[in-house]
Image (tube, rainbow, N blue to C red):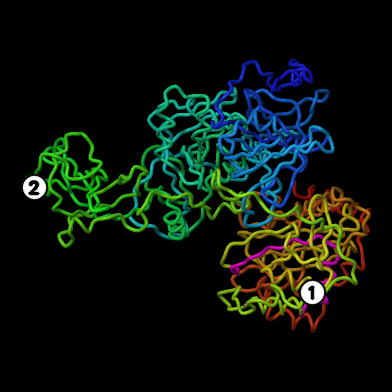
Amino acid sequence: MPDLDRYRQKREQTRTPEPFGDRDGTALPAGARRRFTVQQHAATRMHWDLRLEIDGVLVSWAVPRGPTLNPKEKRLAVQTEDHPLEYAFFEGNIPPGNYGAGAMILWDTGAYHTVDGVSPLDGLTAGKLDFILRGYKLHGRFALIRTGKPAPNSWLLLRKGTAPADDAEVVEVLTQSIYSGLSVVELGHNVSRSPAIAETLAAAPSPSPSSRRGDSPMLAVTGDEPFDHPKWLFELKYDGYRLTAHKPSDGSVHVHSRNGTDYTAAVPEIVHALRHLAVDQATIDGELVALDPAGRPDFEALGRRLSDRHHRGRADLDTPLSLMAFDVLEVDGIDLRGHPIELRKQVLREFVGDRGPLRYVDHVVQHGRALFTVAEEAGLEGVMGKRLGSVYRSGRSDDWVKIKGAYEVDVAIVGYTHGKGAHQRLGALACAVFEDNAFRYVGHVGSGLRPESLAPLAKRLDDERVGAPTCNAAPKDRTQWSQPRLVARVRCSGRTRAGRLRHPVFVALREDKLPQQCGWPDRLASPPTARPFRSPADPHRAALGTPEPEASTPRPSGTVARDHQRNPAPDAREPPAAGPHTARLNKVFWPESGHTKGDLIGYYESVWPWLSRYLADRPLVVERFPDGVSGKCFFQRRAPDFLPDWIPRRRAGDVDHVVCNDLDTMRYIVGLAAIVLHIESARFSSPDHPDWVVLDLDPKQAPFPQVVHVARHVHRLLSALDTPHAIKTSGRSGLHILVPLDGGLDHHQARSLAEILARTVHAEIPDLTTLTRPIAARGDRVYLDYLQNGAGKLIVAPFSARAQPTPTVSAPLRPGQLTRRLSPTQWTIATAPRRINRGGDAMATLFDTAADVPRLLDALSVRLRRATRNSR
């Protein structure tokens, strides 16, 4: 039976911040929703703790590799001691000397229930738990099965159902806490986002003194149509309650609505997240929503949750809430309302994540129509447009425009109610649609009725007046009912689950249509279904899987995925006669230029003699575009299970990578729509020692001739220090400069070398370069990115194609090509092979030479001190 004795025996309450279970849990009915949590724990060994609420405690399992969404994977889960229910909200550092010392983040939480109403305690006793998770990161059906091997407390954690859209591991893609937004490593180092925010604000212009800084929120005017404009940003508009959340430096939290109503006690999940934010103090503006299983706001569910005056302790399991944060008014004592919207959002993004009870609302610049289309297709309320450069002003302002999605519905008028003032004669129309050979009430509409039309309309309805409703589902109120003779066109924002018009507005009478012809339009023919919603700013959503039927999902078939470490011997490999590299070669990958899949494979075949040396014996990560560059894409680091046996794999860390040492493998991988090839700086044979350091010249807002100027300066500097180096385009807008190493440095030392080089360059040409990472703070200077060095860090491989409107490639350059005529997009899969065949690989010496690192460091130190002294 579950109990907390072992938990308390292992801990001293005065030495650890962990909760001690001061209150007893309550046993629940078999089919009730219960709490689950997953906490990532950097103890002696990294692992993830899965905890399920059973019989008043959290029954716990340590999962060394973490949960997976891949049904073909089986994960060891070692049952540990039961934990108190309060532990479901714990995040923090357990001090050294305590049991389980180390950092622990709340990686996911939510509700679970067992399949077919089986008691969780019975399943635990029997050694088999089959359950549905509904969390912020994990959704769907899972199972825990006790094996008793290699130890009596050994279980297997399985994912049931269909595989996700790609094979990315959810614990590798989504690494942040749903509370603090920190990774477990950052929490272990007590990382604060405040220094980065201070740096961003220090580089920003002084705030405007003209903003109206009252206590009320900034409000938008209503726009009629979506629009595009280069000086506006656009966000998805969420249907919820507008709230202001305040985290003072004393650790308390307050959440209020726009009219001052205190909702703090009603939203415990929001309060928990605010308390753990990695800043000392903040005031956030956002929209409180209840999201349905498909990720869309459910306004009715939100209303039910907030109308519960007793704020039941388990309400967050029945209807979890999220605060969609779109603005920040103050952080760490600094008033941000006088700063432009784009800077405020940049600051907000520093400390608010995109998973959990507190979520950052991303945006696009200029393309309001496209985002509005996304909102309409997803069944969202609409979009918000915000003028770039605008400050935060209390009250309504035309710097913010709300554009709601609208539907037009033709309804039969079946009555009316009286109103007040000018609308006393007629306040609202009772509406119905005709379905199943009868009229069905769908709501009243009063907005949009013009005073001059009220009396004539009321007269027409009085002529058809009857004593009882002429429609089904009619409300019992003071409606004056009439025969359905008239038809009205109504604009609304949707249909409620009860079959009512949402936010209806009267448009006009329709004299050309019969009442019996009135029905819901196709898009509103039924209440919204649970179709998954993916926003354009949510690239990892596909990795989460989709909700599944709660009791009918079949058991997965098949066995555990094969061990890719056991590759066939070289002489057992069979060359592929057919496969993705031979199928649909005419499929267009670049719509703007018309280049096809076959063109891409042909290009990689032509440059293989030069490309192969950069891919050999090196972890390969590809960027796949199944529908071409204008469609969705995803990064694939792990070798897919469906690859044929003849393709070699090698393990780096916990990931099985494709080893692309031959042209057959290259053809096959590119045939899977792998357009872009990314490589690491270290080989499988020496994973801790990189072959180069790279300085990424990232322009963003800087003109490309300025990037070329900076590259020439770096070239002259390294040449003066007699240091070999190589130059290539990124294939997009930047340049890469690589310094070869002899294998004597580890990743940390290599990054330090790159940092010293970057700081020296910046000290010598500070007006052209910056070391500031936030884009908005860079201005028109070139960012010297040395952070692309480190274990697992990637660069685009030389000769790799890029997913640009035209099929550009990352092209090696000779120093003499660093001229004003240079364009980062002048080499494509059509033009690059001729140039390479004529002039060879301009980076060919990268593996034949190496920098004299001690001498280079000494020389850079001298130049850095000289440049720093001259700048004073």
Q: Reply yes or no: does residue 624 show up in magenta.
A: yes
Residue hosting label 1? 664
Within the magenta stretch, is there residue 627? yes
Q: Earlier in the sequence, mark 1 or mark 2?
A: 2
Residue 78 placement (x, y as % from top left): 77, 35
Q: Which mark is residue 498?
A: none
Q: Position of residue 118 (x, y in %)?
A: 59, 34
Label 2 residue SS: loop
Looking at the rendered image, the disc whose residue lies closer to the viewer, 1 or 2, is 2
- Res. 43 image quadrant: top right
Residue corresponding to mark 2: 464
What amino acid is labelled 1 in the image? Answer: Asp
Mark 2 residue crowding within 10 angstroms, few (<14) / some (14–19) / many (20+): some
Please state the horizontal and vertical placement of residue 741, each as a whole percent of the image.
Answer: 90, 59
Q: Amino acid at mark 2?
A: Glu
Q: Which residues are magenta?
A: 606-629
Q: Is residue 838 left or right of residue 410?
A: right
From the viewer's perspective, tell me whether residue 16 is left or right of residue 198: right
